[in-house]
Image (cartoon, rainbow, N blue to C red):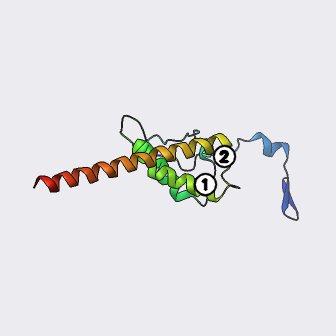
Amino acid sequence: MSYCVSHGKDKVMFLTEEDLKGPSSVVLPEIEQPRGALLPNGEINWSCPCLGNAPIGPCSVEFRESLSCFHKSQSESKGSECMKEYFAMTDCFAKYPELYKRNDKDSQSLEAEKEVLDSLDEDEESSKTTISESDVSSK
């Protein structure tokens, strides 16, 4: 005869040999296949441990926008149109250095990238100004 004894939060079950001879009625859940950064349908797996705490931390919005933009990028230089989102994310990361640590090499390369982006923005603005001035003078 089997019986159960409770000890606080624990329960101890005593079974007879006869109870153990029968087939088990326990149904184990199916083991889920491990997933990577992308789900089978091609969407980003925000719960992937490979992303760390970035999708749920204080910079989660910036991180998700940056990664989503990069993932959807169709340009030849993948992600080149996502620089604003990327810099918004890195600026947010800089506000929380205890959560988002980066080494000195990352910091130096980030500053260099920002300088290049700023110079590209300046060149774009000056070309717009030049075009609009020439359009006005030709009319």
**Which label sits on residue 57?**
none
Q: Residue at x 45, y 46 (%)?
A: 117
The residue closer to the viewer here, 52 or 103, is 103
Q: Which amino acid does label 1 sit on?
A: Phe
Q: In this view, does 29 lie above or below 91?
A: above
Q: Which residue lies furthest to the bottom in this view?
A: 8
* Left or right: 95 as drawn, with respect to 75: right
> Quick check: can you spot residue 43?
no
Q: Mark 1 points at which residue?
A: 93
Q: Residue furthest top?
A: 76
* Left or right: 42 as drawn, with respect to 8: left
> What is the x, y in percent for residue 119?
43, 46
> Quick check: can you spot residue 92?
yes
Q: Residue at x 60, y 61 (%)?
A: 58
The residue closer to the viewer here, 20 or 133, is 133
> What is the x, y in percent for residue 14?
86, 51
Q: Does label 2 or label 1 sit earlier along the sequence? A: 1
Pointer 2 and pointer 1: residues touching (CB < 8 Å)? yes
Q: Residue at x 68, y 47 (%)?
A: 26
> What is the x, y in percent for residue 8?
88, 65
Q: Residue 23, located in which quarter of the rendered image? A: top right
Q: Which residue lies furthest to the left in this view?
A: 139
User: CA separation, marks 2 and 1?
Assistant: 9 Å
